[in-house]
Image: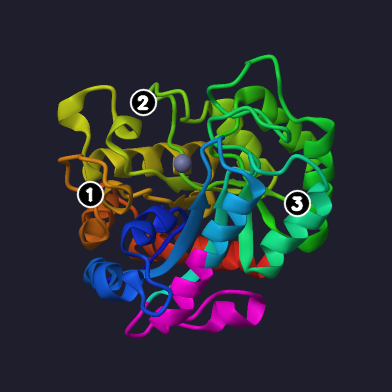
Amino acid sequence: MIRVFDLHADLAEAIRPEYDSSSSALAERWIPLMNDGGIGWSAAASFFSGKESWQDMQACVRMVRRDIENSGAKLILDKQDLKAMPDDKPVFLMTVEGMCGIHDQPEEKIQWLYDQGSRIGSLEWNDQNDLATGNSGDPARGLTEMGKAAVRKMNELHMIIDVSHANEKTFWDLMDASQLPLIATHSNAKSLCTVDRNLTNQQIRALAEKGGLIGMNACESFISDIPEKRTARTLAAHARYIADLAGPEHVACGFDFGAYYGSKQSHDLRSPEQTQNFIEGLREEGFSEEEIKDIAYRNVLRFLEEYM
Ligand SMILES: [Zn+2]
């Protein structure tokens, strides 16, 4: 079974309903499913939709850190930790999705997120906040001055910037502002599925030219406009499309499994134990076994080795 690095998993949402500071919801419920599907590394996102305060953000990030620690799994905090191979548990990487709770002192607050273990972060979810503008925000509004300060701080810390929820203006502002490559942890190709959050050819090429990565998103509505085509096999066609456009070294996995956040989807890539359906799809798309390993996890490990 080929191991996979999943760049986007809504694990705060998965942990919260069963959270108990003395045990681990990940260990009890989710790690066995990740193991069944070959998830060797998983992002653990703390998710903020636009209404959370800074205190809410802190509580969530602490909860995720605590649950990972209680699970006994390894956590990637520095490059040395990239050498840790998954054994009976996946290796985790903490991420932040949306920073709506930051209204002042962005440098200090980003430093706090980093100190808690967060190594990838997006300034926005779909919301429009004090740092940046997400996909549902004003199309004419992008990165703010405070957002630029946040980018400088993230670059200084080598905390990777995720553009998956940025609106187009924010995306291009981030391209200009960031000294380091950007990643889209969970977005597909707009040419194959027109949902707003998928990436245009121009965005895909720009991410690749800057050395970034694009994580394939398994959420049904991001796979195809045609309901019957929302399958792991069609998601593999997005990987093929992006590989042909920008190079297979820029393709990764960021499944955003609906199972973690309780979304009712019925296709064959809704939950971590179904991960190998995507790997099988990559084979059917004609990728070599070496290319499949690159897309599954090696592109991410190499990227983090270079830029984290
Ligand atoms: Zn998301």
Q: Is residue 3 left or right of residue 206?
A: left
Tell whether 86 sits left or right of 103: left
Is residue 35 found left or right of 68 in the rendered image? left
Q: Is residue 99 left or right of residue 230?
A: right
> Looking at the image, is mark 2 or mark 3 earlier in the sequence?
3
Depth check, mark 2 against mark 1: the one in front is 2
Q: Amino acid at mark 1?
A: Glu
Count of picture labels: 3
**Vertical arrangement, residue 142 with respect to residue 282, above or below:** above
According to the image, label 1 marks what residue?
Answer: 284
Q: Quadrant of residue 231?
A: top left
Task: Measuring from the top left, give residue 70's x and y in whole percent.
Answer: 43, 81
Front one among 271 and 216 = 271
Alpha carbons under labels 2 and 3: distance apart: 28 Å
Element carrying mark 1: helix
Judge: label 2 CB < 8 Å from ligand 1: no
Q: Which mark is residue 193?
A: 2
Q: Which residue is mark 3?
A: 180
Residue 220 placed where, x, y %?
A: 27, 36
Q: Amino acid at mark 2?
A: Cys
Q: What label does residue 298 carry, if any?
A: none
Q: Which residues are magenta?
A: 63-89
Residue 107 lies, in percent from the top left, at 82, 52
Residue at the image point whose x is 71% and y is 19% from the top: 141
